[in-house]
Amino acid sequence: MLLQRIQQQFIDSADLKYQCAQSLAPTVEAAIAAILACVTGGGKVLACGNGASAASAQHFAASFVGRYERDRPELAALALTADGAVMTAVSTDWDSRSVFARQVRALGHAEDALLVLSTSGNSANVISAVEAAHEREMTVIALTGAKGGQLASVLRDTDVHVCVPHDASPRIQEVHHMVLHCICDGVDAQLMGLPEDDLTNEVESST
């Protein structure tokens, strides 16, 4: 019984990713374009989320400052979830709703982008961060699930909303992780071209 449950987890995750590969590809492409415009224009990406989404924000920043799959010059990204001293100071002196927004106001500029992750779209501190980013005239890339929650209503037409059509947080987070990998890969491909293996495969498939 447990074995079947484990197998079903893999199947459910794969089914949702297959569905999203078709439905979300255009918005993921738009997210890549927005982040590429940011980093090539001298800006940086600020990223935030709660719980597992906080870890995803840090994973994204690490892939940008370090590398994804190929060596390349460093790209500017900062996870707002990484400084425990700042987060606890803000939540103590103000409230937890402000832990990301104050960092966005302190660090964000018009040429920067804010990447937020929220499976429900209802995280108050993430919504406040988006509002702060708009005050700084920053572009927002929002990764959500279900129908986007309250976050969907505060996004602007110039923002990018990647909404996973599912209600279960684990499945949504798995797709979010894939989307972040697609963003990293897409930015690298735009900056450095396709890897040689991909170019070889394209030539072989066209002959």
Image (spheres, rainbow, N blue to C red):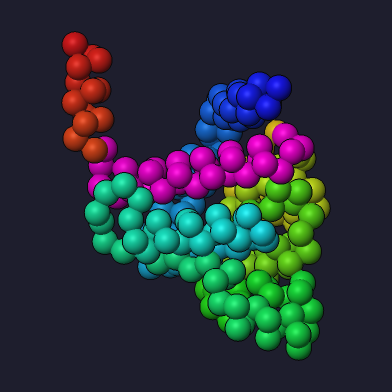
Magenta region's main secondary structure?
Answer: helix
Say which residue appears at 58% left-offset and 44% top-offset: 176
* Location of residue 175 with respect to 118 vertically, above or below: above
Image quadrant in which you'd find residue 127: bottom right
Quadrant housing the N terminus:
top right
The quarter of the image holding the C terminus is top left
State the image coordinates of residue 32 (x, y, percent, origin top left): 46, 46
Pick the residue in front: 105 or 79. Answer: 79
Q: Which is more toward the observer, 86 or 198?
A: 86
Query: Looking at this view, is 63 or 161 the one in front?
Result: 63
Above or below 61: residue 200: above
Q: Is residue 185 magenta?
A: yes
Residue drawn 21% across and 31% down? 197
The residue at the point 62 percent across, 55 percent down is 53
Q: Is residue 64 above or below residue 17?
A: below
- Toward the bottom, the furthest residue is 93
Residue 30 percent location from the top left of the image? 51, 43
Q: Residue 114, percent across and down?
A: 57, 62
Q: Which region shows up in magenta? A: 166-194
Is 192 on the left-hand or right-hand side of 32?
A: left
Q: Is residue 30 left or right of residue 192?
A: right
- For image coordinates 51% across by 40% down, the residue present is 178
Residue 190 falls inside the magenta stretch: yes
Q: Say which quarter of the image contains residue 106.
A: bottom right
